[in-house]
Image (cartoon, rainbow, N blue to C red):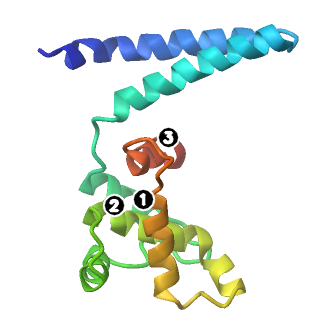
Amino acid sequence: MGTLEKALPGRQHAKDWLTLKIVECLSQPMDKAVSEELSFYNGAYNAVCQWSSSDKRFSKKDADEWTKEMQNEDGTNGPHWTFEQATQIAQEREIQIDPLQFWAALCMVYSDYSTVAVKYKLGGNIEFYIDLAKAFLNDKDAAPGKLYNYYNYIVK
């Protein structure tokens, strides 16, 4: 068993302890010292969360479960495009992104922003959704595993 595998069971303990410390900070009157302490514990908590999931991959199971449950702003449910359609779109445009991530992100941006796109007369413009999905996935400010983390910590 490697070092990472040995350390993973302690991850939940660390998260629990840091959560307790954050709650303790929030229960005190806020001042500069409490604010600094809260920031310290929050940063440590975020680091533990990122470390623990950075080696995980967004899987076909994740993509299928997520897209199947999407409640789209246009009133429909499920993925707006099939995996095959998204793969073809990516191939035609020479998009060099993991096909599962591209499909899930493409469906996500449609699901969440289709009514905004219609409002600005972009609703039928596939390029708009493609560009949004690419921007989401290629975000230079994001930690590794952004889509995995988004799905597991926001969507679920």
User: Which residue position holds label 3?
Assistant: 153
Marks 3 and 1 close (CB-CB < 8 Å): no
Marks 3 and 2 close (CB-CB < 8 Å): no
Q: x, y percentage for residue 99?
A: 26, 66
Marks 2 and 1 close (CB-CB < 8 Å): yes
Side of 126 relative to 95 (left or right)? right
Label 1: element kind: helix
**Residue 27, visible in the rendered structure:** no
Q: Three-letter amino acid code at disc 1? A: Leu
Mark sitting earlier along the chain (3/2): 2
Q: Quadrant of the N terminus?
A: top left
Label 3: element kind: helix
What residue is rendered at 44% in x and 77% in y? 130
Mark sitting earlier along the chain (3/1): 1
Disc 2 versus disc 1: nearer the observer: 1
Label 1 Cα crowd, 10 Å radius (few <14 / some 14-19 / many 20+): some
User: Which residue position holds label 1?
Assistant: 137
Judged from this view, the residue extending furthest toward the front is: 140
- State the residue in front, 112 or 38: 38
